[in-house]
Image (spheres, grey):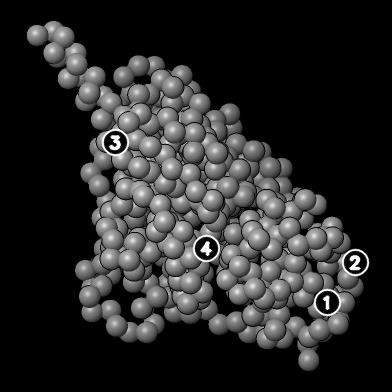
Amino acid sequence: MWIINTQPSRFGAMEEIEHCNKCGFCLPACPTYQLTSNELHSPRGRIAMVEAAVHGEIEVGLGLEESLTYCLDCRACESACPSGVRYHRVLESGRNLLRQQRKQPTSFAVKQILRLVKRPNRLRRAIRIASLLRPVMHYNAVKPLVPLMGYTEQDVRPLPMKSDPKMSVQFFEGCVMSAQFADVNQAAKNLLVRGQIATVSPIAQGCCGALHLHTGHRDEAKAMARNNIQAFEQDMQSLIVNTAGGCGAMLMEYEELLSDDPLWSDRAKRFSKRVRDWASVFKNVCGKVPLEGQGIRVVVQNSCHLVNVEHAGEDVVALLRAVSNDTFVSYSDQDRCCGSAGVYNIEHPQWGLAILDNKMKVLGKIAYDVIVVNNPGCHLQMRQGIKRQNGNMEAIQHIAIYLEQAAQTAENHAQREEFHAET
């Protein structure tokens, strides 16, 4: 039997545990509780389990491991909590206790992902090769990686700045975004250019470290954070924008990650305060950029961390409503997790698919043509959802691609009208 070898007052998340008043407001927001109706798979239950372990009332054993491991870390409970409990601190502290006292082997698939995201060029090559070999990938060790393949980038060419920019931002490329969704990054840059916002991408930047942090490699995540902070200090006045909700949340929380590092805490704080989702920045100038749709119905699958950490979900909705001719259709579950959650759908495929299937059942009751996303994990997960219903996976579009197409449509329309006026 393993018991926590520390005083409860010294346990890092005890303050958050004490703030939880066990009200249960988190239960309806929690995807795993909604899936299982099991209190141990709810935020309230997990907090109670960690608290009991800290006080030596339960062992650090399989029960605690299962409860914490199956959490998506979507942070929806934090948005729902009236007491402002920062649940992620309890979750991470509890998982750290498990790692200290119980061996938790990392799967082959996750090991490869953690290795490759540090080198986006290698990741890009690996994805291309794996996509070609996809039909014959039957080995159990690599099967979990199959859902990550199949996306084909569109040809999005850089748009030149036609006048002096009104402002400049630094662009965080992201490992998966630059390796597998480079078209999305370029589309976002084009839209910012249309709004007279220049973008600069620091060369020394790297992976944000989110996957490493959430799989227990905290020291590696800290090293990645320090590298990015230094890379983006060339211009301390510009905002830092990105196209992935998960990356944006991680970048915003460098301040928390490095709070115990006297050499980096202040630098991390200044960095995090400059981070924005690209859509939040573009929303402020989109009135200058005509957006015209194709007469279709559009829904959104918002990234959990974009909503619950960056608090930018409404900015995405505002942009979708700004597209003329198209109809944005709101639905109750648009901010609820799709089951991707970093590498969750690789480590726990059955649970990830069950959560995804619930999402697709809701969407099945809505008439739509396109599902807009804003995170690579969500993008690939929703493609799987469409595939499982024998639908068209190309109906899943990143918001940057969707809006850039709308901008091009409006531009072409204006040019045709100008031509007819002249003739």
> Residue beneath label 2, please?
9
Whichever of callouts 2 and 3 sits on the residue coming sooner in the sequence is 2
Asked whether the beta carbons under mark 1 and mark 3 sit within 8 Å of each other, the answer is no
- Foreground residue among 89 and 201: 89
Q: Nearer the viewer, mark 3 or mark 4?
A: 3
Q: Which image quadrant is residue 20 in?
A: bottom right
Q: Is residue 389 left or right of residue 47?
A: left
Label 4, residues with CA under 10 Å away: few <14, some 14-19, many ≥20: many
Whichever of callouts 3 and 4 sits on the residue coming sooner in the sequence is 3
Give the residue type that dot 4 points to.
Answer: Ala
> Residue beneath label 1, please?
52
Q: Nearer the viewer, mark 4 or mark 2?
A: 4
**Residue 219's spot in the image, x, y percent?**
63, 64
Residue shown at 81% from the left, 78% from the top: 53
Residue shown at 60% from the left, 36% from the top: 274
Give the Cα distance between marks 4 and 2.
31 Å
Give the Cα distance between marks 2 and 3.
59 Å
Give the Cα distance between marks 1 and 3.
55 Å
> Which type of secondary structure does the marked residue at label 4 adopt?
loop
Give the residue type that dot 2 points to.
Answer: Ser
> Residue beneath label 3, please?
295
- Foreground residue among 97 and 144: 144
Q: Nearer the viewer, mark 2 or mark 3?
A: 3
